[in-house]
Image (spheres, rainbow, N blue to C red):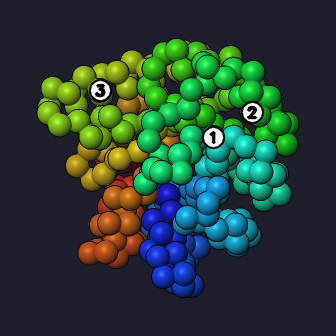
C-alpha cells in the first residue's frame, strides 16, 4: 500500500494529522504485505521523518520510491529500506506519469542501481510495459521491474482496456523470461485490479489512491482487507 495520499491531506494544512505512519501501521494490521512511501524533491507529501519513523516500526517491509538523484540516494543509504523503486519525477505532475527511460540512459542507471544493490537494497525500476525498456532494465542489473499500469487503468473502452491488458501480460512474460521479478501498479482500483492480480508472473502490486479514497467511506482497515481479498481471489480463480 502507498500511503502518500494520507500525507497529502496532512500537508494541505501543514498539520500533524492524518499521520501516514499511523495509516501504514493500520494497513499492515489489515493485511497489507508492505508499505510504499514516495519521497519527492519538493517534499509535497511524504517527509523524511515519516520514512524514518516507519522504518523503525514497520512489521512488514518499507518500499521507498525515489528519483535517481544523488540527494535521494543519500536518503536511501541513510534509512536503508528493504526496497527502493526508482521512478521519474516532474515537478508539475500530480502523480507519477509514465515510466523511466532506461534504454536512453543505460550507463547512468547501471551505476545508480549498482550503488544501491551493493548496499543491500533491493532495487526496482518503474517502467512502461515495453519490451525495449524491460530489456534495458535487465541490462543495467536491476533485479525487479515495476510495470506502469496507467494506460490500462485509464482506458476509455473495453477494447482499449483489453489491448492494454494483453500488452501487460506479454511484457510480464518477457520480463519473467529474462529472470526479472515483476511488480506492477498505478491507477489500480477495486473495479480493475483483478485482471492484473491474476497474472501469475506478477509478484506484487502497489496501490494507493483508490485505497485512501475508499477508506473515507469504509475506514482504512476495511478498504485494505477488501482489496487484499480481491487480489487473492483473482490469483486463485
x, y percent for residue 193: 31, 45
Calculate the distance from the C-alpha at mark 1 to the C-alpha at mark 2: 9 Å
Residue ranking furthest to the front: 92
The structure residue drawn at horizontal position 77% and vertical position 51%, both measured from the top left corner, is: 71
Q: Is residue 156 left or right of residue 6?
A: left
Labels 1 and 2: the sequence-earlier one: 1
Name the residue carrying label 3: 164
Mark 3 element type: helix
Neighbor class of circle 1 (other Cα within 10 Å; few <14, some 14-19, many 20+) is many
Labels 3 and 2: the sequence-earlier one: 2
Labels 3 and 1: the sequence-earlier one: 1
Name the residue carrying label 2: 113
x, y percent for residue 98: 45, 36
Q: Is residue 160 left or right of residue 43?
A: left
Is residue 44 or residue 137 the one in the foreground?
44
Query: Given contact means CB atoms under 8 Å apart, are the residues at marks 3 and 1 in contact?
Result: no
Q: Is residue 7 above or below residue 76?
A: below
Mark 2 element type: helix
Name the residue carrying label 1: 86
x, y percent for residue 10: 50, 77
Q: Is residue 174 left or right of residue 178?
A: left
Query: Given contact means CB atoms under 8 Å apart, are the residues at marks 1 and 2 in contact?
Result: yes
Q: Is residue 200 above or below residue 27?
A: above
Neighbor class of circle 3 (other Cα within 10 Å; few <14, some 14-19, many 20+) is many
Residue 236: in sight, yes or no?
A: no
Amino acid at each position: 500500500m502507498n500511503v502518500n495520499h494520507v500525507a497529502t491531506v496532512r500537508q494541505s494544512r501543514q498539520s500533524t494529522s492524518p499521520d501516514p505512519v499511523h495509516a501504514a501501521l493500520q494497513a499492515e494490521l489489515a493485511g497489507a504485505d508492505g508499505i510504499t512511501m514516495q519521497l519527492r524533491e519538493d517534499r509535497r507529501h511524504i517527509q523524511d521523518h515519516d520514512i524514518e519513523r516507519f522504518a523503525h516500526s514497520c512489521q512488514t517491509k518499507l518500499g521507498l520510491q525515489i528519483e535517481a538523484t544523488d540527494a535521494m540516494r543519500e536518503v536511501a543509504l541513510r534509512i536503508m529500506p528493504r526496497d527502493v523503486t526508482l521512478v521519474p519525477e516532474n515537478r508539475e505532475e500530480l502523480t507519477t506519469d509514465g515510466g523511466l527511460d532506461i534504454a536512453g540512459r543505460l550507463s547512468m542507471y547501471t551505476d545508480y542501481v549498482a550503488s544501491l544493490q551493493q548496499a543491500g537494497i533491493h532495487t526496482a525500476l518503474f517502467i512502461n510495459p515495453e519490451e525495449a525498456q524491460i530489456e534495458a532494465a535487465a541490462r543495467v542489473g536491476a533485479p525487479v521491474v515495476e510495470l506502469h499500469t496507467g494506460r490500462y487503468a485509464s482506458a476509455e473502452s473495453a477494447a482499449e482496456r483489453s489491448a492494454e491488458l494483453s500488452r501487460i501480460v506479454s511484457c510480464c512474460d518477457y520480463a519473467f523470461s529474462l529472470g526479472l521479478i515483476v511488480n506492477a501498479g498505478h491507477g489500480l482500483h477495486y473495479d480493475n485490479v483483478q485482471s492484473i492480480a491474476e497474472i501469475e508472473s506478477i509478484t506484487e502490486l502497489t496501490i494507493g489512491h483508490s485505497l485512501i479514497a475508499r477508506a473515507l467511506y469504509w475506514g482504512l482497515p476495511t478498504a485494505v482487507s477488501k482489496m487484499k481479498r480481491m487480489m487473492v481471489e483473482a490469483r486463485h480463480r
